[in-house]
Structure formats: structure tokens, C-alpha cells
Image: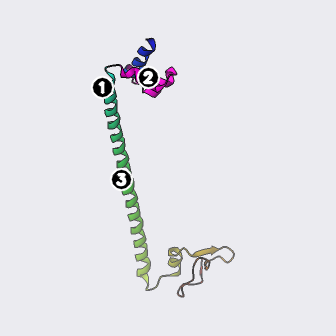
Amino acid sequence: MEKKKKIEDLYFEEKMSLTEIANQLNVSISYISRILRENIHYKTEQERRKAQNRATRREKQKELIYKLRKNKSNQNLMENQQIKEQHKQATKELSKRKTIGNEALRKWCSLYKYDKEKKRYVFDDNQTLKPRDFPLYIKA
């Protein structure tokens, strides 16, 4: 009788779960469930806890969706700003002359690697074939 009272107190008063009670009292969950099913208040408490858990899950889900949307919009904003900056840079470089300069080409094209011995940028033939209008090297 004392164990039954203790289980009911832990469940109804302390608001502990069946697993927590089972771990604390070193009994099985099915034993605790069997004892609690005999109590007339068990069904109402069980429904109340289900409703509370459902509401908590909904709130967490809303927060998660909000954070994901906010991160995505921030990422899109940053990408748009980068594209605008690249566009501005390309406009500046291309508006000066009809052809793009060597320095601008080196910055724009990642196929040029710096050669420390010769102190110049050399086109990397290992990655792709060099177009005819690209210089073989650019002085630093």
C-alpha cells in the first residue's frame, strides 16, 4: 500500500513521468502503469499531459520554422549583396575599356596561380585549356 501511495504522489503531485518513477523506485514501467490505471484521476491527468506536450511541440516547431525562414532570408540577402558587388565591380572594370585588363582578368579568373620565383601569376594549364585571348602570365 505504501508503494502505491508513493507512486501516485510522484505521478500526480511531483508530475514525474512513468520512466522517472520506475528508475527512482526500481520497479517496472508496466507495474506503475497498472497501479495508476486503478486511480480515477489517471485518465484526466494523462489527457492533460498529452495536450500540454502537443502545445509545447507546436511552439517548438513554430520557433524552428521561424528560425529556418529567417536564416534562409538572411542567406538570400547576403547572396544578393555579393552578386550586386560583383556586378558593380564588373561594370567598373568593363566600362574603362572594351577589353578587360590583365589585373582584372587575374582577379576574375581563378585559374592564375602565383609563381614566387618569377614573381608573376601564371595560367594553370592543369585545370583547363587556356583560351587564346588569355595571357600566359601576368606580372605582379
Left or right: 118 as drawn, with respect to 74: right
Q: Dot 2, crowdedness within 10 Å: few (<14), some or many (≥20)?
A: many
The span from disc 1 to disc 2 (Cα, nearest Å) is: 17 Å
Q: Secondary structure at mark 3?
A: helix
Residue kind at label 1, given as amino acid type: Thr
Earlier in the chain: of badge 1 and badge 2, it is: 2
Along the line of sight, which residue is nearer the eye, 100 or 129? 129
Residue 69 badge:
3
Q: Nearer the viewer, mark 3 or mark 1?
A: 1
Q: Dot 3, crowdedness within 10 Å: few (<14), some or many (≥20)?
A: few
The residue range painted magenta reads 13-38
Residue kind at label 3, given as amino acid type: Arg
Q: Quadrant of the C terminus?
A: bottom right
Q: Secondary structure at mark 2?
A: helix
The span from disc 2 to disc 3 (Cα, nearest Å) is: 43 Å
- Above or below, 89 against 80 in this view is below
Badge 2 is on which residue? 32
Figure quadrant of residue 116: bottom right
Name which residue lies at 40% across and 60% down: 78
- Above or below, 119 against 66 in this view is below
Query: At which x and y percent is residue 82?
Result: 42, 65
Q: Residue furthest bottom?
A: 132
Along the line of sight, which residue is nearer the eye, 101 or 48? 48
Query: At which x and y percent is residue 128?
Result: 57, 79
